[in-house]
Amino acid sequence: MNDNEYLLPLTNDFVFKKLFTSNTLFLLDFLNSFFETVDFPLLKSIEILNPEILPDSKEYKTGVLDLNAEDEKGNLLFVEVQNYYDPHFGNRILYYSAGLLRKSLIKGEDYSRMRKVISLSILDFQLFSHEDFISHYKILNKKQPNFPLTDRLEIFILELKKWKDSEILPLHFKNWLQLFFIRSKTDMATKFIPKDHPALTMALEELEKISGNREYQNIYEMRMKAEMDHASRLI
């Protein structure tokens, strides 16, 4: 971790949250690049609801460092990155999403005021055996999919291991995807990062700063050890 050439991986949840809470523009630009790809309504603005990172807490060492945000329509967004396989992953995502749905209503409030929850999980492992690297889930009628039970919950899962650089994607999203695979300044020089993408250019600069910070390097290593210990208990 002493090599100035090395960049901390964005697939680590601490690095992910540190980068995307450093500037709201980064998260807004990344999410809109993804939503454009999956033909989902774009966001005009976003507010991060849990920007704090508490590296000294016991919960930090073992908990989920997720991002909770709210868009201009009041929709709630749950964004996370995970780099180890969890056989109960689907149940966990449903649990977190249901928690946000529950919190979106004040006790006694009418159910019509329930806000929509949009969940995005970025995985650095293969979860499903099918080839699609983006999965989209809604609560639908199996025989009549045009008649959903509710539109208050949508879950997206992005499996990085399945992405191929040759895949046809909007350039905006493809550029952001490349950031998850950059591990060094040499990678930065060889990956196609256009100069006319200011949010991504600033994000790269911020990732360099995070990677060069000794305290953050130590937190990253502590977090990785905790994740590996947790993953080994799941085997």
Image (cartoon, rainbow, N blue to C red):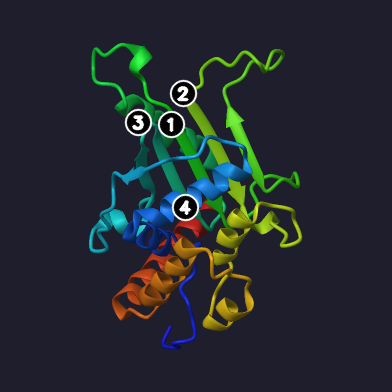
The amino acid on which the numbered mark 3 sits, given as a three-letter code, is Gly
**How far apart, in angstroms, are the residues tagged by discs 2 and 4?**
23 Å
**How far apart, in angstroms, are the residues tagged by discs 2 and 3?**
12 Å
Q: Which residue position is annotated with label 2?
A: 152
Q: Which mark is residue 185?
A: none
The amino acid on which the numbered mark 2 sits, given as a three-letter code, is Arg
Q: Residue 223 location in percent, x, y?
A: 39, 65
**How far apart, in angstroms, are the residues tagged by discs 3 and 1?**
9 Å
Lower sequence index among marks 3 and 1 = 3
Closer-to-camera residue (52/26): 26
**How far apart, in angstroms, are the residues tagged by discs 1 and 4?**
19 Å
Closer-to-camera residue (119/185): 185
Q: Residue 218 location in percent, x, y?
A: 34, 75
Q: Which mark is residue 117?
A: 1
The amino acid on which the numbered mark 4 sits, given as a three-letter code, is Asp
- Report helix, strand or loop for mark 1: strand
- Report helix, strand or loop for mark 3: loop
Q: Which residue position is annotated with label 4?
A: 29
Lower sequence index among marks 1 and 2 = 1
Viewport quadrant of the N terminus: bottom left
**How far apart, in angstroms, are the residues tagged by discs 1 and 2?**
6 Å
- Residue 133: tell me if it is visible: yes
Closer-to-camera residue (222/114): 114
The amino acid on which the numbered mark 1 sits, given as a three-letter code, is Val
Q: Which residue position is annotated with label 3?
A: 74
- Residue 86: tell me if it is visible: no
- In the rendered view, would you say 4 is above or below 33? below
Lower sequence index among marks 2 and 4 = 4
Q: Residue 15 location in percent, x, y?
A: 41, 65
